[in-house]
Amino acid sequence: MKETMEKRYGLPTAICMVVGTVIGSGVFFKAQTVLEKTGGNMVLGILSWIITGLLMIICSAMFAVMATRYQKVSGVVDYAEATCGKGYGYIMAWFLVNIYYPAMTGVLAWVSARYFGEILGWGAADAQVMTLAALFLVGAYAMNAFSPKLAGKFQVSATVIKLIPICLMAVVGVIYGSVKGTLPENFATVADPGKGGMSGLFGGVVATVFAYEGWIVATSINAELKNPKKNLPIALVIGAFIVATAYVLYFVGVAGGATTAELIEKGAPTAFSNIFGNVGGKLLQICIVISCLGTLNGLLMATTRGMYAIAARNQGPNPKMFAQIDPSTNMTSNSAVWGLLVCCVWMVYFYGANLTEGWFGLFNFDSSELPIVTIYAMYIPMFIMWMAKEKDMGVFKRFILPAISIVACAFMVYAAVYAHGITPYQAAAAEGKFSFPVLFYLILFAAILIAGAFFYRRKEDPAE
């Protein structure tokens, strides 16, 4: 008899996974980057957040429609398999478990430790920070591996806690800025008019793309979600809308706490300090730590289930072992161990490639963002095949929504290449050096997928 996972999570947990894994450190610091890119133009800044939020809502709506049709054990992998075949589903699963989830999880462990270390005066690359990052990673793993219900409750709690300062700034910041006159002044003046126009808007959108990433993680608990065909679509759409609204309101609230020139120079902590005093600055850092730990937990919830999603299809290395579910915790323990090990590898890589002078030569790239180059590209064939296969769907769900989603994905891919491939290359070329991070990331991506291909079985799963 094939083992199945307990239906332990309800709609609130699924919504909190979407909100919790998207809202992380980016919500606190991307406001500064957006203002830098737009030259302090508030209108362009708000449009940047809205445009990228709409792109996320469009893609999440497309996956919400897919969720009503396909259900197995791991959300997006199910969708890839149902639309493009078992081989493509395997490629997607192997990519998620060995690159996408663990790369970002390893970075989030470091980011959580970094922000906590700043409170204690530690440097970003100090040994204390890296040690704490390892402890955060192992602690999150232990909670997910030995008490998955506790991990779900922590996800809900972290999401609520991180939304408190965001909502507080959105309300108090607007009131404070209106009374002091800071907010209308910021809308009326532009710190650097030379950065306006379409180039400024596009730069702002590029800056916000990565702050919105992570919503797809919620599909990883598909097999453990109560009534997934109803709850997962609701969670994706509601969660995406909450995130987009929170980002826009927070951005406006921050602009009420300081001039755009101050925000460009010093960042969002200036607004918190102006409104709430020095205590507010420390509060912000504490909220950032909680926010990042919530994101870390959400990503690890997905990472620990990765090899199980592959093994449940009788694929990958030793599927019998990785498909085992611990009878006492009802958790995929062997899969969780694999996830932890891969996360550790990617965390060490991030440290060596980004926090030192570069251990890996041409293969130094930002592992926190470049997986986006491929994840959105991999959605496109799924949407195309959906249009070809789902003949009983209406015109909107079969053609219009997936077509719009393809455009959104293509834009996301271009934005990532623009930010990490073209811009760094031009800067390096001016110094007579060669630098094209996207190219060497894709080489490593291809190597990992080729390694996974050796474990792919073409025979049908006898248990199906």
Image (tube, rainbow, N blue to C red):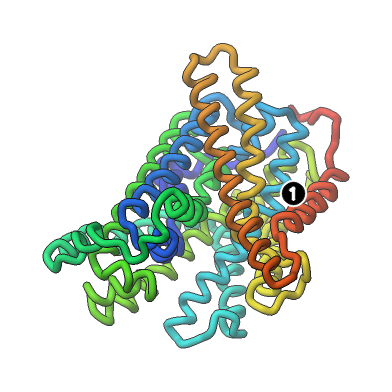
Tell me if residue 360 comes above or below residue 415 in the rendering: below
On the picture, is 458 further left or further right than 308?
A: right
Q: Nearer the viewer, residue 453 or 328?
A: 453
Is residue 158 among the parts visible in the rendering?
Answer: no
Q: Residue furthest front?
A: 194
| Residue 14 in the figure: left or right of residue 271 | right
Q: Which residue is mark 1?
A: 322
Observer-nearest residue: 196 or 326? 196
Q: Is residue 205 above or below residue 273?
A: above
Where residue 276 sits in the image (x, y, percent)? 23, 74
Give the residue type that dot 1 points to: Phe
Q: Position of residue 7 (x, y in %)?
A: 52, 40
Which residue lies at the image location 67% right of the left edge and 31% below the top edge? 381
Quarter in which the N terminus is drawn: top right
Residue 122 position in % (x across, y down)? 51, 86
Rate crowding at label 1 as few (under 14), some (14 to 19) or many (20 or more) other CA atoms within 10 Å: many
Residue ID at (47%, 75%): 115
